[in-house]
Amino acid sequence: MKSRRSLFILFIILVLAAFLRFYKVESLAVFLSDQASDSTKVLEMTHGHLTLLGPITSVGGFFNGPIVYYLMLPFYWILKGQPVAGTVFQTVLQIATIPFIFLVGKKLKNETVGFLAAFFFAVSPLMVDYSRAAFNSYPAVFFSTLIIYLFLKITDRQSIWLTLIMGVAIGFIIQMHYFCITFVIVTFLYPFLFEKKLLSLNYFLTLFFGVVFGFSPFIVFELRHSFLNTHLFLKYLTSQTKSTKSIFFNLYIWPKTTGLLLFGGNFIFGLLGFLGIIATTIAFYLRKQIKKDCFFLFAFLFTVVFCVGQIYGGLMQHHYIVSFHTSLIILFALVIYSLLRKNLLLISIFCFLIFLINLPHWNLEKARHPLQQGMAIADFKKAAKIIQQDKKGVYNVAMHTQGDNRAMPLRYLLLLVREHPLNYEHYGEAETLYFIIPKNEKIKDQTMWEYTSFGSSNIVNKWEINDQYFLYKITKL
């Protein structure tokens, strides 16, 4: 009876998480230049053009591994390349994270802590936002939770197969964000410091082969290209000069991320929550009220993530500590369980308050995601259909929005309808330019290269895309 009740509660949390993430999924999906470029690469893969590289990193000029492309591939194949496929992939992966969060919380303390952690994850504004955007680092939320769960299982009872799966997951997660190298450090050093029974050749060899296998596409590329990315990475790392603000960046990101995860972005609540996490976890360990292996794993993982951030030394973003996101949520569930003295009524009231605090930050009432700056997937589809049906010669496309003058989302939607504008290096060679700009701007006032390099022109047509944008057709004089 108890197991049925537990499954029912978990099912309700899963339904809630799915609703918040799938509601108005196409309207609220993030589809910017990064998503359009990645979608183009995955679409090419559905036609047999495989790759050994993922997207380029935001700093350093080196590349991530391609694993996220391969994980997205089935979704693009099933959904026939629709741009929302990346968002569906992220959402499905997030929903799959919830059972593992519950199991880790249950192992940390009990089922109540597991349910609390699962609920906090389900209603987290940051996690809901992650699910709407197919950025390369976001799948690390699932894999970090899976790795923690597997490692806790392995510390209970050694298993070659679980160690191998964990190694493969680590090989995957490093390709999502280089800060996730923390899991290599933790899983290889932890046995020497805290879990002597794992000090066996079987454990280390199995873990090593798992990591190598998971990381193999990137390794193959490096072997073929004289370790190009490795050299670029080391060059970037050694050329970084540490700012006196680096410790501030590293300290600030933790309460900021806690606020984004749990309190609708409120920094003060995030600071209090983060301090509560540290104090409560230590207190529970000293009183022997949580399992020793859980405490050591969370404490060591936090220490390693913090140290990697300090070595990096630059301005920290919340996704840099993605390997600890669900750990913060799980440990905060322990805080609430402790403060409310196991009182289920008080715990329920607190959950309802968290629900209300986060409600305005899910953006459910909005017609488009704020990052889209007024142009949703449906608007790009409309523009692509207009261009497809219009009479034209050699043409190109551009837009003045989202900081993406090359109009990568529009190019992807045109690709889906078998339209082929000139590449974005060849604006001067086009006979026609389709140009999306805000209604409150005039074409003649545009100074962007994509427009000025087209040369002297004349407006021959104009279409309303939505309440904020026009699509202009211009031809050379």
Image: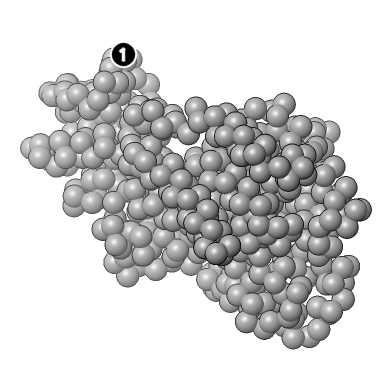
Residue situated furthest left in the rendering:
391
Question: Which colour style is shown?
Answer: one colour
* Local SS, label 1: loop
* Quadrant holding the N terminus: bottom right
Residue found 60% across the figure and 31% down from its top: 353
Residue 427: in sight, yes or no? no
Residue found 83% across the figure and 33% down from its top: 244
Residue found 74% across the figure and 57% down from its top: 109
Q: In this view, does 147 lie to the left or right of 199?
A: left
In the image, residue 453 lies at what x, y percent?
32, 30
In this view, 186 is above or below 23: below
Q: In this view, does 200 lie to the left or right of 34?
A: right
Q: Residues within 10 Å of mark 1 (few under 14, many from 20)?
A: few
In the image, residue 178 lies at what x, y percent?
65, 55
Q: Is residue 341 left or right of residue 163?
A: right
Residue found 88% across the figure and 57% down from its top: 288
In-front residue for pair 20/211: 20
* Quadrant holding the C terminus: top left
In this view, 335 is above or below 112: above
In this view, 68 is above or below 312: below
Q: Quadrant of residue 73?
A: bottom left
In the image, residue 139 lies at what x, y percent?
53, 55
User: What amino acid does circle 1 point to?
Assistant: Asn
Residue situated furthest right in the rendering:
286
In the image, residue 330 lies at what x, y percent?
68, 50
Q: Mark 1 points at which residue?
A: 440
